[in-house]
Image (cartoon, coloured by chain):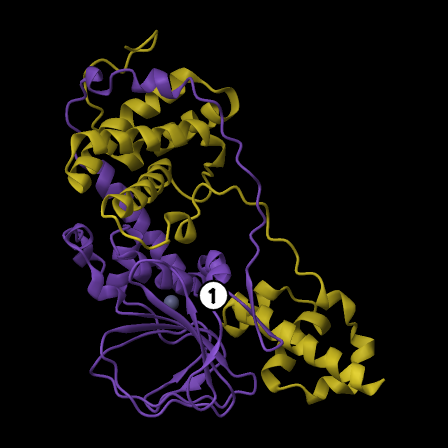
Chain colours: A yellow, B purple
Amino acid sequence: MLIGITLENNKPDVRKPKDCAAEMAAHLDTVAKERCKASFAKIFGYFAPRLRSYALKQMGNEAIAMELVQDTMSNVWQKAHLFNAEKGSPSTWIFTIARNIRFDMLRKLQNRKEDICSDDMWPVLCEQTADPKEKSLEEKVTLQQVGELFNSLPDKQKAVIEAIYIEGKSQQEVADELNIPLGTVKSRTRLALQRLKDMLETHD
Amino acid sequence: MINFHPSNQQLDIFSNGLMAPAESLIISAHCDMCAQCAEKVALYTEAHSETVFDESSQKLDPSLFGNMLSQIMTQEIDKGIDSEPTNSVLELDGRKFTLPRSLNRFSESIGNWSHLVGKIWQAPVNMGGDVVANFIFMEKGGGVPEHTHRGTEMTLVVNGEFSDGLADYDSGDFMVMDGKNIHTPLTKSDEGCLVFSIIDAPLHFTSGWARLINPFSHLFFK
Ligand SMILES: [Zn+2]
């Protein structure tokens, strides 16, 4: 039974998700900051029936559909602070939570043995701090030490090292500029520095 | 520069969570490396969320949800654990390769490297189930004799470059090879080339995964 909180009478809220995005975002904010139950009831009132119809269509089973609604809305309640209005709308955030739960549920229901879970691909609910600066090797090799050895690097590594250490760009900027993946920039940097370090050692 | 991407259809189905796990994983790994596809996935995801929640909701009977609402609100806040988004590094013969974030967890499931042919090395990745996944490393000058594919093989270039007589591939490139492709991979790059490959995953669709293709998908396909 609902204690003290009524769902918005029995009238379905027929607004489109984008038409109530600002309102829902504000509710998520008060849930995150004040654990506001009235706000959460509004979110629940709008999304629970929609999640249920989505889940029913996907899973075809009432009990499992309700489990999906429950899990999704629990996450919304517990992790409202992870919602970031700058990254997307409340409906997109809630959809991604439901999609992830459904993906993992389906995998279990089908008895699939793959060890691949939704978090690997869509870390929607992972709390992550900002990208830490790459450390280690980079700090151990300075440009002065390097001198002319630099010129013996392969062109691609040279370009990356030049941009980062001479022009002072970030690895992300270099990736954008050269139109290559960030991981490639990181690998090239590491390979180049490793090579320089090896050359320095053999020079001694 | 990345020239080979998953199709829009693949990105669309992936973003809707309706793709088989192994294929999802390799596409996700491509998106970690490819800002362009990551952006598309974000757009598809947004479109799906609008579609899914826009459907006129059935008349909400509060008793349907019983005490779910009040029960949820008795739960504690989950602060979670802050984790730094570090990328796993794969070490091979003194060389280090940064893995795309989606493959992070699997860096611990990599088996031993074994010599395949020529200058080609292979290490299996244990993902459970029927998934056949491997890291393959081609040393400079390393090549595979001309061959074709029995099943379907999806490959992601993690680091390096290679050519296969049909095209040149670079870090981040994603390709699907099947029985129709005959190719001769060869790398000339100094640092060699590391690729991640999954075999046959798309053929392992089961009805649960395959029966749902978003009816609006065609709106996004070009
Ligand atoms: Zn791409």
Is B119 situated left or right of A145 in this image? left
Taking B114 as reference, is B126 above or below it? above
Residue at the image position 48 percent from the left and 56 percent from the top = B105
Q: Quadrant of residue A116?
A: bottom left
Coordinates of residue A100 in the picture (x, y in percent) = 34, 44
Is B23 situated left or right of B113 in this image? left
Question: Dividing the image into four equal quarters, which quarter contains ligand 1?
Answer: bottom left
Is A174 situated left or right of B123 in this image? right
Residue at the image position 18 percent from the left and 51 percent from the top = B214
Coordinates of residue A111 in the picture (x, y in percent) = 25, 48
Query: For mark 1, does the 10 Å Cα neighbourhood hold few (<14), some (14 to 19), or many (20 or more) residues?
Result: some
- Return the residue found at the far right: A204
Residue at the image position 43 percent from the left and 44 percent from the top = A124
Q: Is mark 1 within 8 Å of ligand 1?
A: no
- Indicate the quadrant containing the N terminus of chain A: top left, top right, bottom left or bottom right: top left
- Return the residue found at the far top: A4
Q: Is residue B70 visible?
A: yes
Coordinates of residue B2 in the picture (x, y in percent) = 42, 74
- Indicate the quadrant containing the C terminus of chain A: top left, top right, bottom left or bottom right: bottom right
Taking B171 as reference, is B115 above or below it? below
Taking B79 as reference, is A167 above or below it? below
Instruction: Identify residue type, mark 1.
Output: Ile
Residue under label 1: B110
Is A2 situated left or right of A154 in this image? left
Nearest the viewer among B55 and B99 is B99
Q: Secondary structure at mark 1?
A: loop
Q: Quadrant of residue B51?
A: top left
